[in-house]
Image (tube, rainbow, N blue to C red):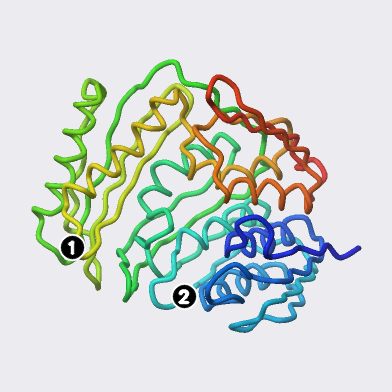
Amino acid sequence: MKEILIDGSMGEGGGQLLRYSAALSAITGKPIKIINIRAKRSNPGLRPQHLTAVKTIAEMVDADVEGLRVGSTALKITPKRRPKGGTYNIDIGTAGSISLLLQALLPVLAFADRPVEATIRGGTTVRWAPPIPYMQNVLLPLLAKFNLKAEITLIRRGFYPRGGGIVKVRVTPAKLRAAEFLPYSRIEEITGVSYVGNLPKHIAIRQANSAKQYLEREGYGKYLRDIVVDYSTPAISQGTGIVLWAKTDQGVAGGDSIGERGKRAEIVGQEAAEKLVRTLKAGVTVDPHALDNLVIYMAISEGRSRVYSAEMTSHADTAIKLCSMITGSDFMVRREDGKIVVESEGAGSNIY
């Protein structure tokens, strides 16, 4: 099979392109070569957290891999089989994001030859990555519409810089089908979780109260249910965060924020609410960060998918270009009434 050449500096040129390239190679069985890996970053090349993702995916398909080392700017992956199910123990090390690993891993597991159970260690709340409660309560319900059968269980939180979080993932392979996420006609409820690890409970309470106040000021108070305050989930480091989500007739929209040293709890809570409200005011369910994650499923499912979102991020744009190159999926992007509409004819019928 002819090798596909991927320029790792394409688009936003970050780690997502590398992770998705490895995932799509495993799913389609196509050999790929990636050059200029993370060329636009201040520390280009493979970092330890990227090695874990590629190594795990390569192991699942018995792939031959060249260039798998820290600092490498070129990588070649040649899969030899369908992804293997079974039990996996994965340690990212330090506070590398478990969520970013799952972005690449979950679509691969959907095509495994039997059910998968994986225990993953790393960061559960990390800057520039969706926190695990977002994955559980926003992304998984959206992916379920593609027929992804997955569960994510949070065992222990892991914050920067120590990490140490533990997550269990279970996936039952199933044929992925196309999905639609149209503008919503009603909001059913808004809820969320505000959490701390090894910090005073009042921080989580203040985050939740700030989020509630903002939602009420913006006219969404009538949909608001309880925002759970969680200060008891184990953690070996200190940290804080909040995730909000709104259930609509079209799916689940989300907004999140994490605490940082010197950042008041009230700011953290309001940031999450602002993100959620921006999506709801656009009249859609798929928030911009969710769109980044849906693109690969649109490419590998069977049938034509259509997604309305509030905006197109550079991550989503890069993912569309990459998925088109490797799977041959036909994507179309347009603007409609101030919304972004992404459509794709998936390649699922040609995969395994």
Question: Left or right of 73: which side holds 325?
Answer: right
Amino acid type shown at disc 2: Asp
Which image quarter holds the N terminus?
bottom right
Residue that label 2 marks? 91
Q: Quadrant of residue 165?
A: bottom left
User: Height in image: 348 above or below 280?
Assistant: below
Q: Which mark is residue 86?
A: none
- Name the spot of residue 249 as percent of width and height, x first: 44, 21
Query: Closest to the observer: 262 or 5?
Result: 262
Residue at 59 percent of width and 83 percent of height: 70
Looking at the image, residue 29 sits to the left or right of residue 249; the answer is right
Residue, disc 1: 262
Q: Residue furthest top?
A: 185
* Mark 1 neighbour density, 10 Å: few (under 14) some (14–19) many (20 or more): few
In the image as oriented, which residue stretches furthest toward the right? 1
Quarter of image, res 348: top right
Give the x, y percent position of residue 153. 38, 55
* Residue depicted at 21% across the width and 68% down the height: 238
* Residue 268: percent from left, percent from top: 23, 49
